[in-house]
Amino acid sequence: MKKLVSEQIVDYLERRGVEHVFGLTGHTVIGMLVALGKSKKIKYISVRHEQIAAFAADGYARVTKKAGVVITHLGPGITNATTGVANAAFDSIPMVVISGDVPSYYYGRHPHQEVNMHCDGSQYDIYKPFVKRAWRLDDPEALPSILDKAFRLAESGRPGPVLIDIPMDMFSREIDTELFERTYQDSHVTVRPALDPDTAKTIAKKLIDANQPVIHAGGGVLLAEASEELAALAEFLDIPVSRTLMGHGCISDTHPLMLGQTGFWGFELTHKMTANADVILALGTRFAEADSSSWYPGVTFDASKTKFLQIDIDPTEIGRNYPVEIGAVADIKRALKQILAEAKVILPNGKQNPAVRKDIADSKAKFKADNKAICDDSRFPMTPQRILRDVKAILPEDGIITTDVGWNKNGMAQQYEITVPGSIHHSSGLATMGFGAGSLLGVKLAAPGRKVITLVGDGGFGTNPSVIATAVEQNIAVVWVVMNNSAFGTIAGLMNAAFGTKFSTVFTTPDTKPYTPDWAAIARGYGIKAVTIKSADEFAPAFKAALDSEEPYLIDVPMENIAVPTPGCWNINDIYNPSELVSEGKLVKKENGRYVLPEHGKSHKV
Ligand SMILES: Cc1ncc(C[n+]2csc(CCOP(=O)(O)OP(=O)(O)O)c2C)c(N)n1
Ligand SMILES: [Mg+2]
């Protein structure tokens, strides 16, 4: 039987269990959307900017662990979505993007909105640097196998986005339904590899023999849903666990072996342990710059003291930044189970390390004690720490938070204790302004029974306030907490420290008076409830009311611009030390007529 390609795509998505598709329309995809609109199983979430579609699909995928699906128009549609899709790529989030394109019979003649500078009908080339694969559908009969391949590729191995670019005439072609037969037979599961048994044994032995081992957990632990296995191994051998930004919540931040975050926005104690470890078992992390203090030896990590054992599902990450004694491709959940089983054979009673537990408990208690005054402070505009304190007291433990960039991410990741795996989502690889407010929509659709909020800066929120329209249209009950310091505050701090000016980072009127849009009024204009906080004591009850309302809600909170503590370092020396000489990213000083490198780590603190 013959059937339209557009209808068969919908059938396919339904069979795959897709329940939500995110997109924004245009003449190249209306044929597809007509078919989608008839579906009883799939809800189409129409947004006001394609970037929001990609962010929402990203948030959706973070919760469901299945590919988020985006449908976008060609040209400006696909380019608008770029940032959101790239954001998913650099955070390893599965996504299938379906884009409409110019009619295949007009390639190269510049049909309306064609991208054809280097090749005809080549908008799909734009995505190639960050998607796992980009297809252009030139033969409609190839579609069934492309769809199977696209979803499998997006969801397997290291997850990520893929693109299927479909010239608009292809949606309206008819092909035999039998061509889709193969897709009925194709299992959607891709079994992930375990460690080979010898490697599991060797890793277990090295952890047991180590004097000061650390397990360093990245986002790969959460992607593999390996939190229980991680806690079990750490507890059996009493090994402290450090984590990256993407590893936030991999095991509870209150766990007695959880050291907390490493890197620029890390902790002193974490660095004392990680930089002096003789063995580090690294799980699902690429040792990215911010988590590794720009790799300055001895600040967060020290390869001269440490043997790295690295397990990742993606071989390209192994040994990327530190030489490995053992590098292994494996599913982290399976690998951890195997290592624990081997450890139990070698050392049936495990290990106890009360000293390390005490160090961690003491250090956490000290950080909290030192932070208490600012957390309890009732000055206004509010301190970010006070906002966090009140959110923590009111949001249910399993409530889900998305962050953006700014204090809301950097301070949250350092100071906000996550106790339920998967209950916080950061943008890390691309650190994209706009992620928090947009991803929120998809997170709530994927987890309708949970409270879902974002903590977002006023700069980040201002990039895409039209997220509110979608929340109204689809009745998505989320809460935007806008931490409003009338500035691109994080950058204002960096710029002021280095150059003594806040040029372009602080929002003002032409006569330099502080300026902020009235976000609450704007939110009300979109049709939701909203409030502007007027004193610190108003925030907690307003936040509770917003959560209880079960409606989309915005809270605009005036906030002081206070820097997040930075015990690590970040090598942006040509910014921090513009008067000094910089060579190949390294600061050089002249001493006795010779240029010398400064002591690692010391000159780079901010
Ligand atoms: C799309 C994008 N553009 C620029 C940046 C660089 N950047 C990092 S933090 C920041 C300021 C964010 O301001 P805001 O959201 O108000 O948070 P705050 O720093 O004030 O807490 C900027 C511009 C970015 N991360 N993403
Ligand atoms: Mg701001």
Image (cartoon, helix red, strand yellow):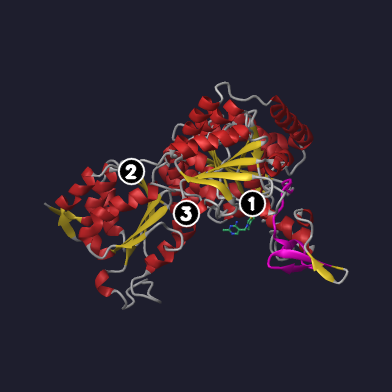
Label 2, residues with CA under 10 Å away: few <14, some 14-19, many ≥20: some
Residue 419 got which mark? none
Residue 49 appearing in the image: no
Between tags 3 and 2, which lies in front?
Answer: 3
Q: Position of residue 417 (x, y in %)?
A: 63, 34
- Give the spatial CA distance, label 1 vs label 3: 18 Å
Task: Identify the residue under disc 3.
Answer: 89
Occupied quadrant, residue 207: top right
Q: List x then y, in percent, for residue 404.
A: 58, 49
Q: Secondary structure at mark 3?
A: helix
Residue lying at 22% horizontally and 51% vertically, measured from the top left:
8
Observer-side mark, 2 or 1, equals 1
- The answer as to whether callout 1 falls within 8 Å of ligand 1 is no
What is the number of callouts on the image?
A: 3
Label whose residue precedes the other's in the sequence (3 or 2): 2
The reply to whether dot 2 and dot 1 touch (C-beta < 8 Å) is no
Of the image marks 1 and 3, the number of the one nearer the N terminus: 3
Query: Magenta region: which residues?
Result: 563-590
Q: Which residue is mark 1?
A: 290
Residue type of the residue flagged with mark 2: Val
Dot 2 corresponds to which residue? 18
Specify whether 227 is left or right of 483: left
Going by the numbered disc 3, the residue's amino acid type is: Ala
As for residue 12 lying within the magenta part, the answer is no
The quadrant in which residue 375 appears is top right
Among the 4 quarters of the image, the one containing residue 346: top right
Secondary structure beneath label 1: helix
Q: Is residue 470 left or right of residue 290?
A: left
